[in-house]
């Protein structure tokens, strides 16, 4: 059965987010398709250091070149479509999509669709400072009639530090989790009815059980969307 499924290509950026996405595809694929079954998956990732240089310069064309490099390699591996289990690189999508050899699922489109389906109206956006200050999520939420709230500048700075100094290095500190919980609680008090975990490492420390707000887990939602695409795309091919 798995041979008929579409082949998922993962363009990795950070190791923790890509690993969680891959694991989710495999584990939940078995739940959907039967014991040990999941679609074919290929992963390619350039060194995060290369991405960090471009992020630091807000050089989205440079980010796009790395993503396109992964896209070319994944196309040669036989992938049918692509995902990037990191939120910030999606700022380069306007440069990526017109030149990509394969179609992409956009992480913010997947999250916005889930938010609308679950009836949320006002979403707290969390993630790196660059992501929170970008239009990546607000534009896609607004297209579905959804509003958003953002962390304060000080909260954005601390989130950025936690992500780059701790989470992507597989360091999980209770005091950092407590900070994220307080931030989400404050955004709840301001009127948010759910929180977008817009860093693909946040689901490693936050979930519906310990978050003051219902969570929209961008990593797992993207993985599930890829699973659906692999199955449904094969059905119509």
Image (tube, grey):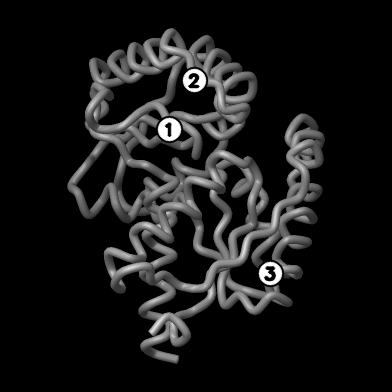
Q: Quadrant of the N terminus?
A: bottom left
Give the x, y percent position of residue 40.
52, 73
Give the left or right position of residue 213, taking residue 125 as reference.
left
- Name, please, the residue furthest toward the bottom: 237
Q: Residue at x 32, y 55 (%)?
A: 113
Give the x, y percent position of residue 22.
50, 55
Callout 3 secondary element: helix
Cα distance between the residues tagged 2 and 1 = 8 Å
Callout 2 secondary element: loop
Contact (CB < 8 A) between labels 3 and 1?
Answer: no
Image quarter of residue 101 = bottom right
Give the left or right position of residue 116, taking residue 148 as reference.
left
Eyeballing the image, is 22 above or below 47?
A: below
Determine which residue is flagged by label 2: 172
Cα distance between the residues tagged 3 and 1 = 27 Å
Give the x, y percent position of residue 43.
63, 60
Determine which residue is flagged by label 3: 74
Give the x, y percent position of residue 218.
42, 45
10 Å crowding of disc 3: few (<14), some (14-19), many (20+): many
Sequence order check, earlier mark of 3 and 1: 3
Callout 1 secondary element: helix
Between residue 95 and residue 198, name the one nearer to us.
198
Give the left or right position of residue 144, taking residue 54 as reference.
left
Q: Residue at x 45, y 31 (%)?
A: 202
Sequence order check, earlier mark of 2 and 3: 3
Q: Residue at x 79, y 38 (%)?
A: 54
Give the left or right position of residue 166, taking residue 57 as reference.
left
Sequence order check, earlier mark of 2 and 1: 2
Contact (CB < 8 A) between labels 2 and 1?
Answer: yes
Q: Quadrant of the C terminus?
A: bottom left
Determine which residue is flagged by label 1: 204
Q: Residue at x 78, y 50 (%)?
A: 61
């Amino acid at each position: 059965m798995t041979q008929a499924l579409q082949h998922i290509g993962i363009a990795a950026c950070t190791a923790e987010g890509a690993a969680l996405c891959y694991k989710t595809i495999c584990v939940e694929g078995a739940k959907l398709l039967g014991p040990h079954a999941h679609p074919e998956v290929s992963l390619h990732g350039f060194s995060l250091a290369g991405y960090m240089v471009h992020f630091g310069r807000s050089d989205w064309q440079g980010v796009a070149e790395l993503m396109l490099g992964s896209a070319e390699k994944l196309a040669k591996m036989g992938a049918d479509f692509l995902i990037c289990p990191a939120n910030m690189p999606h700022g380069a999508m306007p440069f990526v999509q017109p030149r990509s050899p394969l179609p992409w699922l956009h992480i913010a489109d997947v999250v916005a669709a889930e938010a609308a389906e679950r009836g949320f109206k006002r979403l707290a956006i969390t993630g790196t400072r660059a992501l929170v200050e970008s239009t990546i999520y607000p534009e896609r939420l607004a297209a579905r009639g959804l509003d958003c709230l953002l962390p304060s500048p000080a909260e954005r700075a601390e989130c950025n530090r936690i992500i780059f100094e701790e989470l992507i290095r597989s360091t999980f500190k209770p005091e950092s989790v407590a900070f994220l919980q307080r931030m989400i609680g404050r955004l709840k008090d301001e009127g948010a009815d759910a929180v977008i975990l817009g860093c693909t490492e946040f689901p490693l420390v936050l979930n519906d059980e310990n978050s003051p707000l219902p969570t929209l887990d961008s990593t797992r939602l993207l993985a599930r969307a890829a699973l659906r695409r692999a199955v449904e795309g094969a059905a119509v091919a």
